Image (spheres, coloured by chain):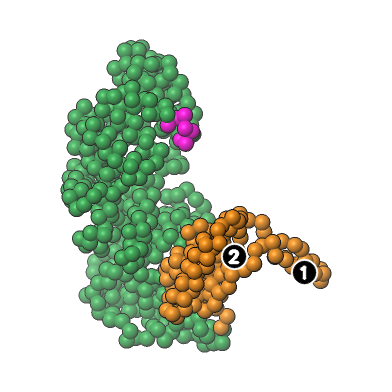
Chain colours: A orange, B green
Amino acid sequence: MQYVLLIYENEKSWVGVSEADQKAMFGEYHAFTESIAKSGHYKGGEALQPVSTATSVRVRNGKTLSTDGPFAETKEQLGGFYLVEAANLDEATAMAARIPGARTGTIEVRPILPTK
Amino acid sequence: MSPDDLAGLFESGGGEIRRRALATLIRLLGDFDLAEETLQDALTVALAQWPRSGAPANPSAWLVAVARRRAIDRLRRARRFTEIEAEGHLSVPALGPTDTDEQDAEWPDDRLRLIFTCCHPALALEAQVALTLRTVCGLSSEEVARAFMMPIATLQQRLVRAKAKIRAAGIPYRIPGSSDLPERLDGVLAVAYLIFNEGYAPTSGDELIRPALCEEAIRLVRLLCELAGASPDYREARALLALLLLQDSRREARLSAAGEVLLLDEQDRRLWSSARIEEGLGLVETALREGPAGAYAIQAAIAALHGRAHAPQDTDWRQIAALYTLLAHRAPSPVVELNRAVAIAMAGDLDRGLLLLEALRASGVLAGYHLLESARADLLRRQGRISEAAEAYRAARALARLAPEQRFLERRLRELEGPGALDGTH
């Protein structure tokens, strides 16, 4: 099965973090990505720009409305994701627990809807 | 097979054979609904055949074999009807006739798998409880709905959602690996304890005890212990079994003939079940010998000290207070703190117990909990502070939700205000 691991974290928690700590965190993410790539679980993943760069789009009555900001204002924001292959939910949640952001934020694990 | 045995297969909750077959079918078919439906078909066939031909040597295996063939037929039919759509969804090839040995007498692991799947933390707690009672314990939907005082439609919706999540999210049908086991076992034990507590002290309705739920919880934990064998990983499961047996041993004594609540020191201890106490004590001793005590083992040890006392004055309150202090370190909670305060008071240090209760009350964490007020009332009464005690009983009565609890507090209040109450010897 495929799962997407959505990384939610409070963006504000990055404010004032020293460069050394930021570097250490990137290093951790890099090591995690490497390890799941090596084990064959990694199918994709990206980090996102902060929600201040977000634009929300809705089409109503044929008219497109674009507004500044994310879909919903929340305490923790979507900051990145992984797409992984896992045998079952337990394997997926075990991987989610190893994402560095799990220690400070929340990882939402969602199965991919099979299309075929 | 006698007609009675056969009838037992169909009675909800009655059929060991049926429950065993279901656990294995879920593994083989990978689908709860398909397993339940085809098992029902197989039971219908059995009902027609067995009285004439006699029951097979291994009824569970027979039911599994028949149900599985039905499942394969159904899937093939569904595949023909919606061939294109079904591509990739149906796992007919995995159900080939050679991939399992139907003659296997027992599949104990399947029942353990079923328990862990029903109590998976990815399911909401209420869904875990409902699914466990329905699938592992074999209760009917009507019985589960009645036990939790909910409309049957609500329960069925909850079950449908839980099964859909198991399927869609890929919740595995397996016994957790050793690294997850302690945490996952905690979850299973929490579900069993919740079921027991809903029977021991129902949170709604007019009944003060629902024995059937207590029995189901005990049966569930007993099954878990049996399936786990002597594995040291399952120590807390054995401790919980001890705790439940010891709590349940008092069932017959907890209500008066008129259906009123009786506290520990008012109960006729001859009504306590000596069989339950004996079994519970044996399990506690083993659990404590096996290693450092977990939260259930400590609570079981406390229950054991009550169970051992032939009269209220024989109760070893000092040791109980010490155990509550240990429990407050291991698994801190306001309710544990409340019990610790009462135990300290009962052990002879009334002032300190009351002081701890007042601190707990001031913190506000148990605001609205009638047992805090009634415990406080009892200690005030013992201290001879009658008007304050009466006020606390009145506060407790206002908070109590169940009618019999309200009547109990009413009775306490009358005793307090009645003649001879002021000598504080109650």
- The amino acid type, in three-letter code, at marker 1 is Val
Q: What stretch of residues is rendered in magenta?
A: B360-366
Which secondary structure, mark 2? strand
Q: Chain of mark 2?
A: A
For the N terminus of chain B, the image quarter is: bottom left
Residue A39 in sight in this render: yes
Which secondary structure, mark 1? strand
A65 up-or-down from B30: above or below: above
Residue A76 in sight in this render: no
- The amino acid type, in three-letter code, at marker 2 is Gly
Q: Nearer the viewer, residue B202 or B335?
A: B335
Q: Residues within 10 Å of mark 1 (few under 14, many from 20)?
A: few
Left of A91 or right of it: where is B272? left
Left of A61 or right of it: where is A20? left
Q: Which residue lies under the disc numbered 1?
A: A59
Left of A65 or right of it: where is A6? left
In percent of width and height, residue B28 lies at 37, 77
Residue found 33% across the figure and 25% down from its top = B352
Is B383 a magenta residue?
no
As measured in the structure, the alpha-carbon distance from the residue carrying label 1 to the one carrying label 2 is 25 Å
